[in-house]
Image (cartoon, helix red, strand yellow):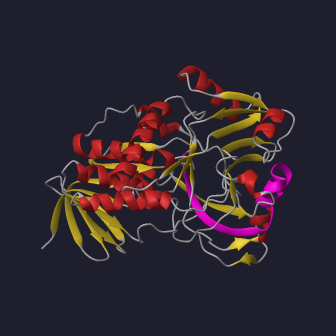
Amino acid sequence: MTKHYDVIVIGLGGMGSAALYHLAKRGINALGIERFEIPHNMGSSHGLTRIIRLAYYEDLSYVPLLRRSYELWAELEREFGEQLFYQTGSIDMGPEDSEVFSGSLRSCLENDFEHEVLDSRQLRARFPGYRMPAETMAVFQPQGGLLAPERCISAHAQLAQHHDAEIRTGERVLGWGILSDERVAVRTDAGRYLTEKLVICGGAWACKLAPALASTAIPERQALIWLAPKQPAWFSPERFPVWNGQVEEGRYYGLPEFNPTGNTPGMKLGRYHHRGETCDPDKVDRALYEEDETLLRGFAERYFPDGAGETLDMVVCMFTNTPDEHFVLDTLPDAPQVSVAAGFSGHGFKMASVVGEVMADLAQRGETRHDIALHRLARLEKSTPRRPPVSTRRAPPRLNREG
């Protein structure tokens, strides 16, 4: 017999696991379907650490979502009985007129956030691992820090099961459709399910799972690196805040050495839109190349030379970018019983806890108390991408690891 649920969630990474947790906690009969394991390293929610910061330059409307995400991460920690958030402070830095610095400062001022403004000399004196150009200005916000993403996903998934959600892993969704009675039929490589509401949290696969996103949620190959600090004490969580930086080479981000469970140590950093390579999520090139390492090491050697020791590890993940780099949180216009969370454009994981709450709201009531006007699908109808796809010719792989 075909099993029936109140809600089915497709994809149990950062967003989907949170959505399933919130649904189950409300007593809703919910099923979560994940094509890989929980957690896994094939999408966008792995890599040992993720930045969370309260001062937000991307748009001031994110701040209420961020406030709620902090509350929900704390609640999840209490229920799961494990630390998931580590407060290091956060640095947003760049030239005085840069989007990163000026936008972060505006966010702090308009929201009355505790913060300090530091020039490049003050930044280095306070945090000696940083060696930024003379024109650099920085906003230090003490409430920033990092999340342990794999543990966050495990917490949401395990607690969802504790609240009676059903989870199926290693099961690939082949398609879904609306039936004549308005229910949704979901077909996988292992069976068929019926549901009143469907929530799609497919990450880089959202463009394949929701045709409405085919041209507006574009996967992109990313590479990350971990480097052995030459001065380890300077790159510990106590002395090296998480950071976002805007320099002449582009926009980069990084995190301190973090090794609470024996995983990969080292200073971690990446470049937003690494090499501008759009990809098919089923065919993304997961090999690591010399030019991947050169791009990231070159930045580290210039601005964080005391952190740029040997390469300890590199991994590949994916961003899923919308044209304006804001999220998609909405019901589908031609299928209101189907909601989607997608297009997190490299800055979404910190809000996974509240995105889960939003998606549970949309599935349960078709609306949410949270302000998601910025994230509605309608805004993308006239949007154009900021960056065209880039094709690159590569040298042979230097490493043969998978992200």
Q: Position of residue 167 (x, y in %)?
A: 29, 66
Looking at this view, is 61 or 88 the one in front?
88
Which residue is depicted at the point 33% across and 62% down? 158
Q: Position of residue 140 (x, y in %)?
A: 67, 34
Give the answer, above or below, for where 385 lies relative to 49. Answer: above
Say which quarter of the image contains residue 54.
Answer: top right
Which residue is depicted at the point 66% across and 64% down? 265
Give the answer, above or below, for where 107 lies relative to 14. Answer: above
* Number of marks drawn: 0
Which residue is depicted at the point 39% across and 31% down? 371
Looking at this view, is 178 or 98 the one in front?
98
- Magenta-drawn segment: 295-322
Q: Is residue 90 left or right of residue 206?
A: right
Q: Is residue 141 magenta?
A: no
Looking at this view, is 319 or 138 the one in front?
138
Q: Is residue 98 left or right of residue 55?
A: right
Looking at this view, is 208 or 44 the one in front?
44
Quarter of the figure with the N terminus = bottom left
Say which quarter of the image contains residue 369.
Answer: top left
Q: Position of residue 86 (x, y in %)?
A: 54, 49
